[in-house]
Image: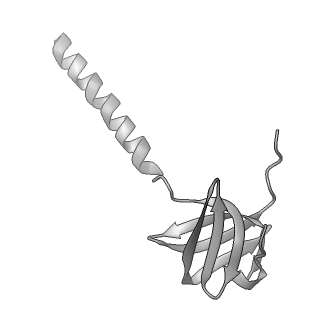
Amino acid sequence: MFRLFAFTLAALVVTSFTVASAAKPKGDSPHGVVVSAGAGKITVKMKMEEKSYDLTTDAMVTIKGAAGKIEDVKAGDHVKLTMTGDKVSAVAVEEPKPKK
């Protein structure tokens, strides 16, 4: 009886870790500082590297909560990107977080 209980408990623990890690895939929302944006592309500096992304044709852009266009996004803006596959489907310009 104890073996059955221990096995069931172990299975529940493994299942809950698997579900928790699958709930939000890593790399789903990159964020950083804009280097350049426009013409269906955005280049963002994240930590020590720059990365360029293509935008989906219907990518949504918000600038501090208001609707905008990719041409309105400026170098130096802090952004959070939402990915669909390997393309950006949403760009959100945000206030930079204060440094402590």
Residue furthest out toward the front: 48
How many numbered discs, if any? 0
Q: Nearer the viewer, residue 71 or 84?
A: 71
Residue 50 relative to residue 64: left or right: left
Question: Which residue sits at x=75%, y=78%?
Answer: 67
Q: How is the image coloured?
A: one colour
Q: Is residue 19 above or below residue 10?
A: below
Q: Nearer the viewer, residue 11 or 41?
A: 41
Q: Is residue 98 above or below residue 76?
A: above
Residue 46 relative to residue 15: left or right: right
Residue 76 relative to residue 7: left or right: right
Q: What is the quadrant of residue 39 in the picture?
A: bottom right
Residue furthest out toward the top: 2
Question: Which residue sits at x=38%, y=36%?
Answer: 17
- Quarter containing the C terminus: top right
Q: Position of residue 56 (x, y in %)?
A: 53, 81
Q: Position of residue 42 (x, y in %)?
A: 63, 76
Q: Position of residue 51 (x, y in %)?
A: 57, 67
Q: Is residue 79 above or below residue 66?
A: above
Residue 3 relative to residue 61: left or right: left
Question: Which residue sits at x=17%, y=14%?
Answer: 3
Q: Position of residue 37 (x, y in %)?
A: 69, 79
Q: What is the quadrant of residue 54 in the picture?
A: bottom right
Q: What is the quadrant of residue 11 in the picture?
A: top left
Question: Which residue sits at x=38%, y=43%?
Answer: 19
Q: Nearer the viewer, residue 44 or 82?
A: 44
- Quarter containing the N terminus: top left
